[in-house]
Image (spheres, grey):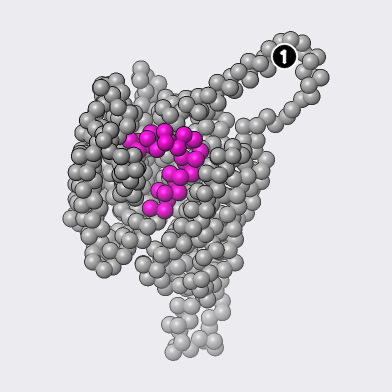
Amino acid sequence: MYNKGLYNDWVPKPVQLLLIVLLLAVVMPLGGVYTGNISYLVSGTGAMTEYFMWANYATTIGMGACMPIVLRMKMRFKVRDKMTVLLVLLGVLSYINGTTMQPMVFVFTALFIGFLKMMVTIELFLPLMTMIGNRGMFYGLFYTFVLVMNQVAAYYSVVVSIHYNWQHFYIIAAVLCFILALIHWIFMHDKYFALKVPLHYIDWMSIMLFVSTFMFSAYVFSFGKQQDWWNSKHIMNASMAAFVSFALLVVRQFTLKRPYLSFMIFKKNNVQHGLFMLLFLGMFLGTTALQNTFAVGVLGYDQQTNAGLNLLMIPGIILAGTIAVFWFKKEIPLKMYIFSGFSAMMGYALIMYFSMVLEFNYENWYLPMLLKGYGMCSLFISVWFYTLDKLEMDDMLAAIGLVLVWRTFLAVGFFSALYSWFQYRFQITAVGDLAVYIDGMTVSPQTLAANMKTLQLNAIIVAGKKIFGYIILVGFGVLLYVMTHHFGRERFRYLRFIRVLGGKSVIARRRLRERKQLLEEIKDAAGPAV
């Protein structure tokens, strides 16, 4: 017997929806590292910050590695058995993180947490998409909920770490996973989703090459500044290992009968332009490091106050999700919605550029964080929708892992590392420029310490302003690109009488194009139901 739902027939529909929401609220923010309490992990374990940045990237890499095989895993096991085992394993991994002091353990558990939680997430996609029926509206609701939960989880990870210990939050996450496993063992049905498929078609060597490619890249992004980039043999070796692993991964895909990854979709125009826009989304999201440096290093915020800044993004996130649902329901073209998202990010960068001063008040954060939340959520929804639009199901599943890693890890990690390097260089230059004003006539031995502190803070502000200035310049180019991009529409339209001159063959070709377009629209409408 097959059952495409998740729960037994005797479970009321509102209860089923409540259980799905609870599962999303617990599993989606789950990770090997929570960005809010990294400082507490560093002080508690005595390890360098870079290890936990590496672990943070590893969660996304694990999710990307699992994505091409999630459908096969879904059809291989019974829903209840798989969900229960996955939740128990996630709880065990969270418990391990709460009891270990070794930073490399965090890296490996984060990788497995990302891999396992993607299998849980795919179980929730199909019922929700079936209920909503519109892929764009589903993205609007889903990403809004997930991004809000991520901000809430990051904030409360700091609160728990302050009042108790950084280990307690991992224990709480483990307990929640165990409770959900018990609940779903009771309420879920024990039938297969569809025809049972074998697992021996999965190429585990390709998965290992995928993981090694991006884990070595994550090591470069995380430890580059600490190791002095290309002056370090470790960074050079990791870079070469990432390149060789990716080359072997690509070659292997062309020799397999059932390849793990497909590169066919990267020939499509919308995928290429979507990846380009996701790269610039990463450029704006990478400014989080600059924001944290300004808030903690210059303004002197404690970790809880700094984590509370992310909660200020929630109104913007909800606004973007609400507009997205309306936008996709009315089937309005995506161009202006994407433009509004990049414009909001530009507004955030402009405000930060002009407002980064020592007298910056907490109330000054309200508008920029609102714009940042709106821009992040709207671009996650719209650019992701545009990138994966009109793709065959098999091709999409075989390449979405690469797109996910590109969006959440490569783009953000690259720009975060780049900003870190530029901030260090610009800060040294700023200190040299400001030192011109220090001499024995203006600074006495009694006031030297206070003046040096002010000098250092101003150097940090100057470096941050410089980087935001360059981001704004590039941002204007991004806005121009979005305004001039066709987003799937014909760039040129010919008058009807010119087409008539071509004879019946032109009309026939036009009818074929219209029929093909109609089939694409039917396929898109059927996609969420599948």
Q: On the image, which quarter does residue 58 sit in? A: top left
- In the rendered image, is residue 257 in sight? yes
Q: Is residue 439 above or below residue 42?
A: below
Q: Residues within 10 Å of mark 1 (few under 14, many from 20)?
A: few
Q: Main secondary structure of the magenta part?
A: helix
Residue 134 painted magenta:
yes
In the image, 42: left or right of 416?
left
Q: Is residue 229 above or below residue 133?
A: below
Q: Quadrant of the C terminus?
A: top left
Q: Nearer the viewer, residue 528 or 470?
A: 528
The amino acid at mark 1 is Val
> Measured from the top left, where is residue 93 in percent x and y?
22, 47
Q: Is residue 305 above or below residue 118?
A: below
> Measured from the top left, where is residue 354 in percent x and y?
59, 66
Q: Which residues are magenta?
A: 122-150
- In the rendered image, is residue 474 in sight? no
> Measured from the top left, where is residue 348 in percent x and y?
56, 59
> Measured from the top left, where is residue 421 in percent x and y?
46, 56
Residue 227 painted magenta:
no
In the image, 423: left or right of 337?
left
Q: Residue at x 23, y 56 (%)?
A: 172
Say which element carries label 1: helix
In the image, 131: left or right of 379?
left
Q: Residue at x 80, y 19 (%)?
A: 498
Judging by the rendered image, the residue that carries numbered circle 1 is 506
